[in-house]
């Protein structure tokens, strides 16, 4: 399944792309595996460093998991004005439908911190919703 979403007109634009990983999933074990690719684009005139992330992952039963940590995929990338950074990661939930949302904390060269919201995006097996 493909799902893409972005937040335009922001200091930083965040775009998401989601795929269902059928070969790693097992519906009889309540295991649904999704990969997601995030593209972060620095639309500001400042150099920004991504220092931390916070995710809220919710399955269709309402179970919530919070994930917080430094950077993303072991990195704290620095984005010059106009630069993009792309990374991929994954999530495992117990239902064929769920959501993710969260935020990044980014810091400019002056040490000012900026909260960059990541709007809710769906995790869904193909053809579960029209």
Image (cartoon, grey):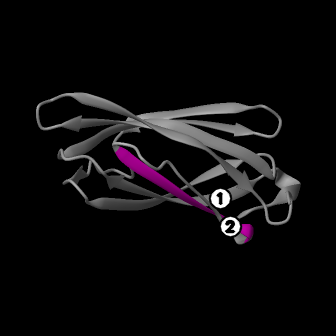
* Span of residues in magenta: 12-22
Left/right placement of residue 71 relative to residue 35 reads left
Name the residue that disc number 2 marks. Answer: 21
Q: Earlier in the sequence, mark 1 or mark 2?
A: 2
Q: Secondary structure at mark 1?
A: strand
CA neighbours of label 1 inside 10 A, class few (<14), some (14 to 19), many (20+): many
Residue count near mark 2 (Cα–Cα under 10 Å), binned few <14, some 14–19, many ≥20: some
Q: Kindly indicate whether the residue at mark 2 contacts the one at mark 1 (C-beta within 8 angstroms).
A: yes
Q: Give the quarter of the figure containing the N terminus.
A: bottom right
Prevailing secondary structure class for the magenta stretch in the rendered image: strand
Please name the residue that numbered disc 1 is placed on.
34
The residue shown at (81%, 53%) is: 96
Q: Is 107 or 36 nearer to us in this picture? A: 107
x and y percentages locating residue 3 in the rendered image: 65, 61
Which residue is depicted at the point 45% across and 33% down?
68
Q: Which quadrant, please, contains the C terminus? A: bottom right
> 15 and 87: which one is in front?
15
- The image quadrant of residue 41 is bottom left
């Amino acid at each position: 399944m493909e799902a893409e979403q972005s937040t335009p007109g922001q200091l930083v634009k965040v775009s998401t792309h989601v795929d269902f990983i059928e070969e790693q999933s097992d519906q009889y074990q309540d295991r649904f595996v999704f990969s997601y690719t995030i593209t972060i684009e620095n639309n500001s005139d400042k150099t920004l460093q991504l220092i931390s992330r916070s995710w809220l992952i919710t399955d269709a039963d309402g179970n919530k998991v919070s994930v917080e940590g430094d950077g993303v995929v072991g990195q704290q990338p620095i984005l010059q004005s106009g630069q993009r950074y792309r990374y991929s990661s994954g999530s495992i939930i117990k239902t064929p439908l769920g959501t993710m949302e969260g935020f990044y904390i980014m810091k400019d060269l002056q040490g000012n911190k900026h909260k960059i919201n990541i709007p809710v995006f769906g995790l869904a097996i193909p053809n579960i919703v029209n």
